[in-house]
Image (tube, rainbow, N blue to C red):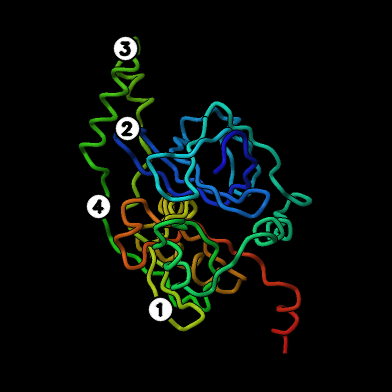
Amino acid sequence: MISGKVKVYITVKTYPTISRKYAELVCTAGIMEDGSWIRLYPMPYRLLNDEQKYPKYSWIEVEVEKNTSDFRIESYRPQLESIEVHHVYKKSGHVDWNERRRIVLGNSEVYTNLQTIIDKAKSKESPMSLAIFKPAKIISVDCERCDPNWDSNKLESLAAQARQMNLFQTEQEREEEFRVVQKIPYTFYYVFEDDEGKRSRATIEDWEIGMLYLNCLKRNDEKTAIEKVKHKFYDEYTKRDTYFFLGTTLSNHYISKNPFIVIGVFPLPMPPEHEQLSLF
């Protein structure tokens, strides 16, 4: 069990959700220097100071303690005031994917069989809840309409907290501060196969898929925005050396037959040797 300051390479930021207790939360996870996973929760990302707002694929240092309300072995509670953001790896103004590959895949186990990680998740003694997974084949990206609004009870609870904490602000100032992130009115899924041909369907909760949809929607109708999301996450990513960051949700960890969802996508460029072979 970890206690104290840790150095984490951030690989996962999910699209924000809202909570009665903590306002907006972003599921954050990353890989430590020894290749092991850590989940930082709760993380009210948009309430952090600007210099603490870590981008994906950056190193941070943070004081942590075991999150005793979460049985999953990787879950730790961050001390928000201790967050320090360090190196963001780039190369000549461009993303250094070789460096990302080295850090993420260099010391970490990569799984190709879904049942293997499900069995590890169901362990009562050491329930694993984060993993790097290499799909044998990505079949499709599906999309389904969902409720476009946040839970009204949660919103009212958060509004009451805002009023209580900001007694000396005007109503307009409170409203400005209380603006929550827009809810995505669609749920996106990956359909994929593992190394035994087992087909699965998993929700995608990557921060980037939500932001991509919203950015596309600014210039297009909903149908076109969805098509552009599918183009990016399927057409483009199936041409790359793509890995999934999989994670479980606390409420479904022991309940669901397959508790894993896609909490991040790692679309590496194809290795040079693969590109060379593909020419023939």
Of callouts 2 and 1, which one flags the residue occurring earlier in the amino acid sequence? 2
Amino acid type at circle 2 is: Lys
Q: Quadrant where the C terminus lies?
A: bottom right
Q: Secondary structure at mark 3?
A: loop
Q: Earlier in the sequence, mark 1 or mark 3?
A: 3
Give the x, y percent position of residue 190: 42, 68
- List the residue tagged with mark 2: 21
> Mark 3 sits on what residue?
167
Q: Nearer the viewer, mark 1 or mark 3?
A: 1
Distance in Å between CA atoms under marks 4 and 1: 27 Å
Residue that carries the numbered disc 1 in the rendered image: 199
Cα distance in 3D space between marks 4 and 3: 33 Å
Picture coordinates of residue 88, whole percent (x, y):
69, 44
2 and 3 marks in contact (CB < 8 Å): no
User: Could you tell whether 254 is left or right of 15 in the image?
Assistant: left
Residue on which the image places disc 4: 147
Q: Name the mark nearer the viewer: 4 or 2.
A: 2
Q: CA distance from mark 2 to mark 3?
A: 19 Å
From the viewer's perspective, is 234 left or right of 54?
left
Quarter-of-image position of residue 177: top left
Asked which secondary structure carries label 1, the reply is strand
> Mark 1: which amino acid?
Arg
| Residue 241, above or below 56 | below
| Figure quadrant of residue 97 | bottom right
Which mark is nearer the camera, 2 or 3?
Answer: 2
